[in-house]
Image (spheres, rainbow, N blue to C red):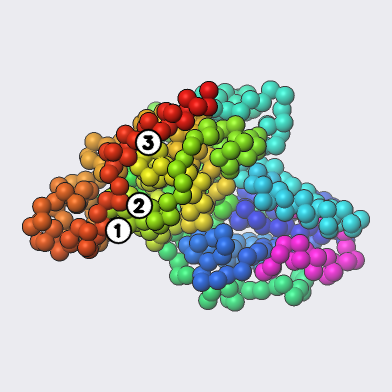
Amino acid sequence: MQVAIVWFRNSLRVHDNPVLSWALESDNINAILPIYIFEEKIHQKSTPTMGKHRLRFQFDCVEDLHKNLKNELDLDLHIFSGNCLDVLESIKEELQPYEVILLTEYSTNPQDRKQTETIEKNLINTNEKWSAKSIPSSQTILDVEAIVNSPRYKPPKSMKDMVRLFTLEFGDFDNIVFKTNDPNPSLTSRKKGLSVNSQHQTSLDKIRPLLATPSYFRGGESEAITRLEKKVISQHDYVNSFNKPKSISTNVKGNPFEPTTTGLSPYISTGCLSIRRLWNSCSEIQQSSEHTVPPVSLHGQILFREMFYLLSRSTANWDQDTGNSQCKEIDWGELNQVQLDAWESGQTGFPFIDAMMRQLNATGWMHHLGRHAVSCFLTRGQLWQNWTHGRDIFERKLVDSDWALNNGNWLWLAGVAPFSMPYYRIYNPCPDGKSSLNVETKDAEFIRHWVPELAEFPSKYIFEPHLAPLHIQESAGCLIGKDYPNPIIDRKESRKRNLQSFKHSLENLR
């Protein structure tokens, strides 16, 4: 008998899952063992690499996957805790009589790749009954490995490059539709689920009490499909007119939690939603009427994602500030832990920056223009700190954390990449209604919610409360410097100084 171990790592879904489909459709596979491994110890509702909201979201995804596998395919997801090699070694003991193939999705993340190499060296290559297979295009549309190893490949630097690449791969760009693959009941009935016992086995019921309560974004494929229907499929005008730079950064009026964008990024990053299904949903809507085009359209956002995946695989040291061909080696300042802590905790004295960071801390999410603002503030704008410090904080806290995208976006917004905006375009951390950050300033509901100390401030002063006369501060019940911090830096002086520093760094690189 041949057994397929379907290891769910970053594709936590049943629909259009190439790894699961391969196991279900292969004539050589008699039984399937679906597994998920919680590799890190949980302490204080988090792990070394996952903050409490990211970890809770991941747990919700696994819990929903467990339910969907059982309901749709009558397969039991086996949950393990511990080092992946130890877990697989324990499974090997249970499956000794069988031929086994370990199936995973392709990944550009070097930690995943190193993990795979370790398993192949210590488990696969030492056991003639075991083999391994990595399935491409599980988390991306493109076969990343095939593209970057093609003789014609050149690292993309723009949206034009990506449109050209997609056209070469798939034909007429305006008519691209991708095949998706959902489980076929006639095939799944031939596959039986397998059970094993291991000292590393655990249960969702044992893990749940160790976690934070769910925040605004609930993880899982079921939530992903519901949000796709609500925010995309049923919103034709929204899809056709989508223009990402013009979406409001301070979220939906009356709901400081709900984004004006689709809010699908957490579900895409965890693989709860197939990127092909999102593309096709947009294509079906756009074929019937006029619509925006890349880079501002929803298809454009998917192309940016694919671009960063390609660059993350083809660029050595993609996540480093040295030895990285996509990163100018700017001479950033020494780490200022006090300022970094103030930025992370939302205590900088700049309400827009603080509101965004507090939203991140409370929910694990932030609008993309908010990310623009806080990353610029931390790096070239005001604090002159290395972009990797902010990258690490985002990596741990964001529920849509993605190694390829997180590094790509920080490279872009720090102004150090070939695809970056000009370094001298610096966001004002005290935006008005005309700002490209698209802030709702009339009622300032977003600021009042996330920075409640300022809830009674008149809108005229709420983005720069330290400029409010004392009697205004007193009537609002918030004294600046006591109840809410003064700005930790002079934004105008720091901007001027940083522009000079960036310019000098560039000159020294020539």
Splitting the image into 4 quarters, where does residue 430 fall? top left
Q: Disc 3 or 2, which lies upstream in sequence?
A: 2
Q: Magenta stretch? A: 80-105
Q: Secondary structure at mark 2?
A: helix
Q: Mark 2 sits on what residue?
A: 356
Write the residue at 21% across / 46% down: 441
What amino acid does circle 1 point to? Trp
Disc 3 residue type?
Asn
Instruction: Say which residue label 3 marks.
Output: 498
Element at label 3: helix
Q: Is residue 244 magenta?
A: no
Tag 1, which secondary structure?
A: helix
Q: Position of residue 357 (x, y in %)?
A: 37, 54
Q: Amino acid at mark 2?
A: Met
- Tag in front: 1 or 3: 3
Out of 485 and 115, give the one closest to the viewer: 485
Q: How far apart are the two marked residues, 3 and 2, measured between alpha carbons?
A: 23 Å
Q: Is residue 229 left or right of residue 314?
A: left
Label drawn at residue 195:
none
Q: Position of residue 239 (x, y in %)?
A: 41, 38
Going from N to C along the chain, the mark reached first, 2 or 1, is: 2
- Give above or below for 440 relative to 453: above
Q: CA distance from mark 1 to mark 3?
A: 29 Å
Q: State which mark lies toward you, 3 or 2.
A: 3
Residue ID for mark 1: 450
Q: Are marks 2 and 1 in contact (CB under 8 Å)?
A: yes
Q: Residues within 10 Å of mark 3 (few under 14, many from 20)?
A: many
In the image, what residue occupies the spot 76% across and 59% down?
5
Cβ–Cβ under 8 Å for marks 1 and 3: no
